[in-house]
Amino acid sequence: MLFTLLNQIILISGKNLEHGLKKEGLLSFVRELDGNENDSIDNYLRDASMYARVVILSVRGALGSYWGDHDWKAGDFEDHQARKAYEALLRVSLLHPTSDKFQDFTDKVKERSLKDYNYSISEGEEVNFVVGAFYDGVYLLGMALNETLWEGGDIRDGVDITLRMWNRTFTGITGRVRIDDNGDRDADYSILDLDPITGKFEVVGHYNGMDKRYAHVPGKRIHWPGGREGPPPDIPKCGYLDDNPECRDREAYMLVIYGSFAFGVFLAFASTLICVAYK
């Protein structure tokens, strides 16, 4: 897993992901990116390839057209290599709500952004999920404060207010919101894959955080690199460093066979030449 240290949110999510993967015994390699331009990402990936077949990148992605389009095309000589690399990439993004309630909310956000901040959100630009999640967070805080006042509690008791927000479920602007007993939200995610024909990322599946269930999008599939029909094996057949003894024995065996065949061909050719010379 590779994650950046330059963004506090990404740092926190990266550390949490690292903890969870280690707890499940699924993490064998971690590198923290400090933004040093002298460090080559190729070196990080080369090191990771010695331990794992799947590399998780925890980095800041595009938040909308205001921040620019973060895809493989940069208009330079490296576009071809970048596209090949992106064909092996699966993006995990927060599931964007499509309900009428969220659409009404985004319309109001666009109106307020123009009226109060003189910023016009373009027609094709989506209001980011984080905006709705922040609204739901404030709504959840309001519920906890109302309950505290109703029961005659102290709204200055931060610990009590926080505990009231944990381990509960409600319907918010972004859909069903469930906060677990650790204060984390069980979010829903979309899985995006690069279509090798169009060169665009498309949603191929969804993960439901509350039900812990993955469902593929009908008519869509993941395009695995190398023309594979399915994901690569967890461990390469000959090991990450090609040091599996069975493969070495097989290689030695094949060398003996090929060597014997080549020697036989040489003897046959030499015998033919000798016979022709004597005639």
Image (cartoon, rainbow, N blue to C red):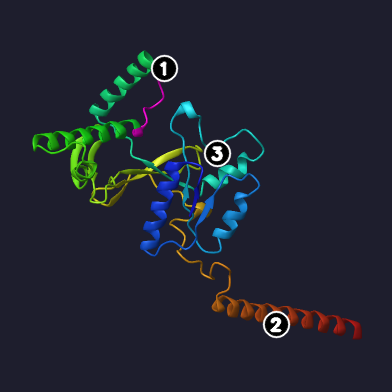
Secondary structure, mark 1, is loop
The reply to whether residue 247 is in sight is yes
Please identify the dominant SS of the magenta region.
Answer: loop
How many angstroms separate mark 1 from mark 2 (CA)? Answer: 76 Å
Q: Is residue 40 left or right of residue 196?
A: right
Read off the residue under disc 1: 120
Residue 19 painted magenta:
no
Q: Say which label, 1 or 3, has the lower sequence index.
A: 3
In the displayed structure, 122 sits above or below 254; it is above
Mark whose residue sits in front, 1 or 3: 1
Q: Identify which residue, 235 or 55, lies in the foreground.
A: 55
Label placed on residue 72: 3
Percent x, y of residue 99:
25, 31
Q: Which residues are magenta?
A: 118-130
Query: What amino acid type should be assigned to the residue bearing mark 3?
Result: Trp
Please state if 93 lies on the left or on the right of 169 as rendered: right
Q: Residue at x 63, y 44 (%)?
A: 37
Give the secondary structure at mark 3. loop
The circle drawn on residue 4 is: none
Q: CA distance from mark 3 to mark 2?
A: 49 Å
Above or below for 123 versus 33? above
For the question of whether residue 279 can be seen, the reply is no
Q: Earlier in the sequence, mark 3 or mark 2?
A: 3
